[in-house]
Amino acid sequence: MPKLDDIREALGGAHQLYRALFEQSPVGVFLYDASMELLDFNPKLLEMLRVTESDLRAFDLKSLARLP
């Protein structure tokens, strides 16, 4: 059975890899939860949308679901 420290080390490495891929992606990426609350986004998304971080945080993703 793996030791707790081994598990933590493996998860830490996986998280670092995820963060690097997320932050350095050549495309915009965002993460939201089941209630459509924006959780995270990468710098490329801001660049692609030509908005500031505060603009994007203020955006209501639920408004997209109400489009005709």
Image: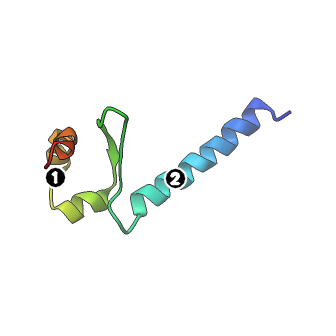
Q: Which residue is disc 2 drawn over?
A: 18
Classify residue 37 as left or right of residue 21: left
Which quadrant, please, contains the N terminus?
A: top right
Q: Earlier in the sequence, mark 1 or mark 2?
A: 2
Q: In which quarter of the image is residue 57?
A: top left
Label 1, secondary structure: give it. Answer: loop
Residue type, label 1: Thr
Cα gap from disc 1 to disc 2, whole angstroms = 23 Å
Q: Position of residue 3 (x, y in %)?
A: 80, 32
Q: Position of residue 14 (x, y in %)?
A: 60, 49
Q: Where is residue 18 in the image (x, y as percent from the top left)?
A: 52, 52
Residue, far front: 68
Classify residue 10 as left or right of residue 2: left
Total number of numbered discs in the rendering = 2
Circle number at residue 32: none
Residue found at x 68% / y 44%: 10
Q: Where is residue 50 in the image (x, y as percent from the top left)?
A: 15, 61
Classify residue 8 as left or right of residue 37: right
Circle number at residue 52: 1
Label 2, secondary structure: give it. Answer: helix
Give the answer, above or below, for where 30 lies relative to 21. above
Residue found at x 82% / y 35%: 2
Residue found at x 14% / y 48%: 67
Residue found at x 16% / y 42%: 66
Residue type, label 2: Tyr
Classify residue 47 as left or right of residue 34: left
